[in-house]
Image (tube, rainbow, N blue to C red):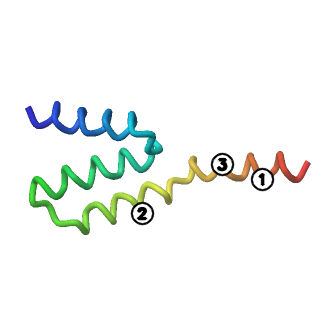
Amino acid sequence: MTALLFIALFLVLILLGIPITFAMMATTLAYLVSTDAPLEIFVQRFISGMESFPLLAIPFFVLAGVVM
C-alpha cells in the first residue's frame, strides 16, 4: 500500500514538471520521513552515489567533446 502511495507521489511530481532527479529525491525523502529513519542516511546515500567512479566518465566525456 505504501509503495503505491510513493509511486503516485513520484508520478504526480513528474506530471507537475519537476525534473526527475528532484522528484526521486523528494519521494525518497518523503519515504525516509514517513518511516522515522534517520535523515543522515539520506545524506550519506546521496553523497556516496555521487562518488561512483563509473559515473565520473559521463562529465569527462562531455568535457572532452567540448574541448574538441
Q: Residue at x 75, y 47 (%)?
A: 62
Q: Residue at x 16, y 58 (%)?
A: 33
Query: Mark 1 Cα within 10 Å, few/some/many (few <14, many 20+)?
Result: few
Left or right: residue 40 compared with residue 17: left
Q: Is residue 51 above or below residue 57?
A: below
Per the image, label 3 sits on a secondary structure element best described as: helix
Q: Is residue 35 above or below residue 11?
A: below
Q: Which mark is residue 57?
A: 3
Q: Which mark is residue 63?
A: 1
Q: Amino acid at mark 2?
A: Ile
Residue sitting at the far bottom: 40
Residue 58 at what x, y percent from top left?
Answer: 65, 46
Per the image, label 2 sits on a secondary structure element best described as: helix
Residue 19 at what x, y percent from top left?
Answer: 47, 44
Query: Mark 2 Cα within 10 Å, few/some/many (few <14, many 20+)?
Result: few
Q: Mark 2 or 3 closer to N-term? A: 2
Residue 46 at what x, y percent from top left?
Answer: 38, 59
Q: CA distance from mark 2 to mark 1?
A: 22 Å
Q: Amino acid at mark 1?
A: Leu
Q: Which residue is mark 2?
A: 47
Q: Residue at x 50, y 53 (%)?
A: 52
Q: CA distance from mark 1 to mark 3?
A: 10 Å
Q: Kindly indicate the quadrant of the structure image that contains residue 16.
A: top left
Q: Is label 1 or label 3 in front?
A: 1
Camera-side residue of 67 and 2: 2
Left or right: residue 43 compared with residue 39: right
Q: Is residue 36 above or below residue 58?
A: below
Q: Residue at x 35, y 51 (%)?
A: 25
* Labels 2 and 1 touching (C-beta < 8 A): no
Q: Mark 1 or 3 closer to N-term? A: 3
Q: Amino acid at mark 3?
A: Ala
